[in-house]
Image (tube, helix red, strand yellow):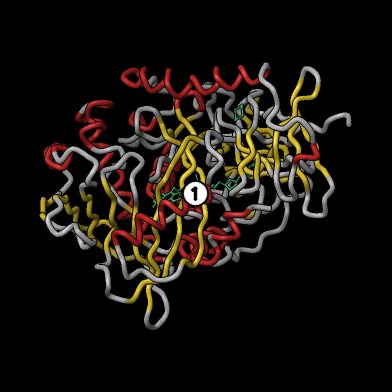
Amino acid sequence: MNVSAERSKAIWGAPEINAPALTGSVSAEVAVIGSGVAGLSVAYELARTGMDVVVIDRGPIASGMSARTTAHLSAYTDDGFAELIRMRGLDAARLWRQSQADAIDRIEAIADALNANCDFRRLDGLLFLAPETDPKVIDSELVASAQVGMLAVKQQGAPFARHQSTPCLRFPNQATFHPLKYLTALAAAIRHAGGRLFANSPVVSVAEKDGSIQLVTGDGAHVTAAHAVVATNAPINDRLAVHAKQAPYRTYAAAYEIARDSLPDALYWDTLDPYHYVRLQPGDAQNDILIVGGEDHKTGECNNGDQRIRNLARWTRDMIPGVGTEITRWSGQILEPLDYVAFIGRNPGDEHIYIATGDSGQGMTHGAVAGLLIADLIQEKANPWTALYDPARKPIRAMGEFLRENATAAKNFAEYLTPGEISSADKLASGEGAILRRGMGKVALYRRMDGSLCERSAICTHLGCHIHWNSFEKCWDCPCHGSQFSPEGEPLNGPAATALAKTDS
Ligand SMILES: Cc1cc2nc3c(=O)[nH]c(=O)nc-3n(C[C@H](O)[C@H](O)[C@H](O)COP(=O)(O)OP(=O)(O)OC[C@H]3O[C@@H](n4cnc5c(N)ncnc54)[C@H](O)[C@@H]3O)c2cc1C
Ligand code: FES
């Protein structure tokens, strides 16, 4: 059960890329684990050069966060350029902006070359001042954008109710597309170039020994490869080195009918933190689809998804009073790197294992960056972005963020001593989950719709934090590094690769 993956299909459709499960022993030059935008981009860039590539996914192909995205393609950073310059310095911020612009160009070129028919289009991005924020932020972003080489035009007025004189920055030549149509075209091209795709094959271990990589799946299939790319969104091979430098956040999205031409086709973001993000998707003859996102919170720290969707709806109807009925609502997880730049490259401590993570709210362009950068690293070609995205870097200027975000783990470990959320399983309604103390430990209880109980250990199989129930998503979330488990304890999202332990009851 993956609630939001089902709900986002109302907008993007189901990923229809059939692939067999992996069985027996397979060898390849490169094994890519994960078939989202990062994994498929890397696989595509390598397969087209003639390399022998396999892609292995835990679930259906392209059914992870890339199937839940809202697919803004922008070279503007969602942390703001002033903040990025402060954190990484001007040269790195310039290089980051260039890499993101190049990623959009690459997506456009691939979509063209593959005839992907994926609604790719260039449009403006509009950053508009939220009433609650200091107006100076628009001017400081105007200056910072110029410093990093991003064209920005200051204007008065955004096309929303009561925003006729709101200060805004317009960024020309950003883009958007239909993510699953694009990924379907990538998958077909990988196959056409001889690549092999395997679905429903969870990888449980990735190890490098004597210059060769060994992967094992939950069903005992093996892959031997010269290189492995762990593109599982949150890397399943990393214990802490990278996970301590990023933090998992849940973000919410909803889609509404909107009469055609009632809002200019653009990407919109406000200056709040967390910010709202808005775009259009072509709909039927009369209507388009308005996709609105925001209301982010740290994973596992709130269990009020429906309230957050109501907040989004209120905000949307206040800004765009003519908006029609809600089509669907969903949520997903993003990983916020503490120094605002994703981790893409050689996994710390390994020679031939690469990762792509820390996507922030910009995982689509980061996926394309991963395609270009990791393909170059594997082919031993120089790439100007290697140091910028290096997963081994130390986020020295992000020490405050490091301490704040990693306090979650310390706080979570205190839960070993606290009472459970319910005193007895009788208190649990069908379709809900909660934590119960049993003796020295805690158990995660889920009451199935038929009334029977599923009981698992409440301890995350990554590094031992306590999981929390998520009623909106019907899953268990781990606040420490973002692992998610189904109600029955199966891993849905890394870094955990194995199921919650069964209890003795
Ligand atoms: C609501 C929402 C809105 C967003 N909006 C935007 C936006 O506007 N613009 C933007 O650029 N980004 C946006 N993002 C972020 C972006 O969608 C993601 O960062 C991006 O899709 C991540 O791609 P990925 O390939 O890293 O991960 P995924 O797409 O999650 O792919 C990872 C794959 O790895 C597989 N996997 C995991 N574990 C294993 C295992 N053990 N074995 C085998 N396979 C495994 C999963 O099944 C999955 O298919 C948004 C995200 C959300 C949730
Ligand atoms: S995700 Fe790391 S302890 Fe749960």
Q: Is residue 244 visible?
A: yes
Q: Nearer the viewer, residue 371 or 394?
A: 394
- Name the residue located 48 percent from the left edge and 21 percent from the top edge: 406
Q: Is residue 315 above or below residue 490?
A: below
Which residue is rendered at x = 19% and y = 59% of the image? 162
In which image quadrant can residue 221 be found? top right
Q: Position of residue 108 (x, y in %)?
A: 34, 60
Q: Quadrant of the C terminus?
A: top right
Q: Does residue 424 appear to the left or right of 35 in the view shown?
A: right
Q: Give the image location of residue 399, x and y in percent.
A: 36, 17
* Label 1 C-beta lies within 8 Å of the nearest ligand 1 atom: no
Query: Which x, y percent locates residue 187?
Result: 54, 60
Amino acid on which disc 1 is placed: Gln
Closer to the camera in the image, 71 or 186? 71
Q: Which residue is under mark 1?
A: 307
Q: Residues within 10 Å of mark 1 (few under 14, many from 20)?
A: few
Q: Is residue 100 above or below residue 6?
A: above
Q: Which residue shows up at 38% across the image and 37% down it?
A: 381
In the rendering, at what x and y percent does residue 363 appear? 42, 46
* Residue furthest bottom in the image: 285
